[in-house]
Image (cartoon, rainbow, N blue to C red):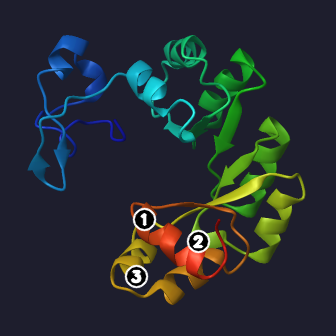
Amino acid sequence: MHDHKVDRTTTGKGVAEEFTWAELQQFFIVDKGKKTKLKIPSLHDALELAYGNVLIDLDLKTDKIAEVVKVVNKTNSKDFVFFFDSDYHVLARVYQADKDFMIMPRAHSVQQADSAINLFDPPLVHIDFSFYTPQCVETIRSTNARVWINALGDPDKDLKAGKEKRALKNLLQHGASVIQTDEPALMLEALRKRGLHL
């Protein structure tokens, strides 16, 4: 679940963590407002499916870190899972569990990005457009970390409307190296056209 509640993405209603697994399995996934035949996968199943195929942005939104770490270890997913959160106390618990876990802190300013780097030595730092500047990018890249920027919202809308140039200009103007998008096929096509992706 991306959200704390199951309302938006399933046929159920309520806070995800307040249900038992059996109760969650009574709901169906909703895609673009339409009910599907799919059920909510477990973290274990999702990580096994992803193994060797994609990187996983594990957006924590929970304080049940020991349980999450246990599943990551059990599925041998350590090399392709990024633990993402804005709560540095939660990320500190992940880091304490295993300093080799890949931490992706979200920063809300250049100063916070610098603090995140000092705390976690992360391979990625998630930033927002409000402080997407050459100074911020240099601060992050000076430690060999990558800059993660979000295309969700206006850039994705521009991609869908065929305004690739405007979408990419805003996303790439200061050197972000990872783009999160709801339109991966359109994004890859736009990047490949410009020689920015293999």
Q: Is residue 44 visible?
A: yes
Q: Amino acid at mark 1?
A: Ala
* Disc 2/disc 3 C-alpha distance (Å): 16 Å
159 or 27: nearer the viewer: 159
Which is more N-terminal, label 1 or label 3? 3
Left or right: where does residue 72 sit relative to residue 42? right
**Percent position of residue 19, x then y:** 22, 18
Return the residue at label 3.
158
Which is more N-terminal, label 3 or label 2? 2
Q: Amino acid at mark 3?
A: Asp
Which is more N-terminal, label 1 or label 2? 2
Which of the labelled discs sits on residue 129, or is there none? Answer: 2
Depth check, mark 2 against mark 3: the one in front is 3
Under circle 2, the secondary element is helix
Return the residue at label 1.
185
Which residue sits at x=48%, y=84%? 164
**Percent position of residue 42, x then y:** 35, 22
* Disc 3/disc 1 C-alpha distance (Å): 14 Å
